[in-house]
Image: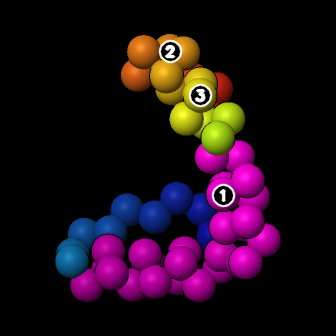
Amino acid sequence: MGKQFPKTNKEVRRYIKEEWEKLQLDDFKRYVDQMHDRCEAIILANGGHTKW
């Protein structure tokens, strides 16, 4: 599905639930595995923009 622009709190909650249900265990593993590199990039950028 493309971009969604919710107009009510009920729609926001529904869209969040739909997107949450699309996540797979491998998605979380990838994010956790990259956390060290992400944190290091933020530190080196003094909190500024990073590639992440």
Mark 2 and 1 residues: CB-CB less than 8 Å, in contact?
Answer: no
The numbered mark, 1 or 3, whose residue comes first in the sequence reads 1
Q: In the image, is residue 39 above or below residue 13?
A: above
The numbered mark, 3 or 2, whose residue comes first in the sequence reads 3
Where does the image place residue 29, in percent across and percent down from the top left?
A: 73, 65
Where does the image place residue 31, in percent across and percent down from the top left?
A: 67, 56
Query: Residue 45, which numbered label?
Result: 2
Residue type at mark 2 is Ala
In the displayed structure, does residue 26 sit left or right of residue 50?
Answer: right
Residue type at mark 1 is Val
Instruction: Specify few, some or many for label 1: CA neighbours under 10 Å numbering under 14, 14-19, or 20 or more.
Output: few
The numbered mark, 2 or 1, whose residue comes first in the sequence reads 1
In the displayed structure, does residue 49 sit left or right of residue 36?
Answer: left
Q: What residue does disc 1 label?
A: 32
Magenta region: 10-35
Say which residue appears at 73% left-offset and 53% top-offset. Answer: 33
Label 1, label 3: how far apart the Cα atoms are: 14 Å
Q: Secondary structure at mark 2?
A: loop
Q: In the image, is residue 40 above or below residue 26?
A: above
Where does the image place residue 32, in percent across and percent down from the top left?
A: 66, 57
Q: In the image, is residue 51 above or below residue 46?
A: below
- Prevalent SS, magenta region: helix
- Residue 49 makes an appearance in the image: no
Number of dots carrying numbers: 3
Q: In the image, is residue 46 above or below residue 2?
A: above
Where does the image place residue 39, in percent across and percent down from the top left?
A: 55, 35
Say which residue appears at 60% left-offset and 62% top-offset. Answer: 2
Query: Residue 40, which numbered label?
Result: 3
Task: Point out the image quarter for the C terminus.
Answer: top right
Q: Secondary structure at mark 1?
A: helix
Instruction: Specify few, some or many for label 3: CA neighbours under 10 Å numbering under 14, 14-19, or 20 or more.
Output: few
Q: Nearer the viewer, residue 24 or 36?
A: 36
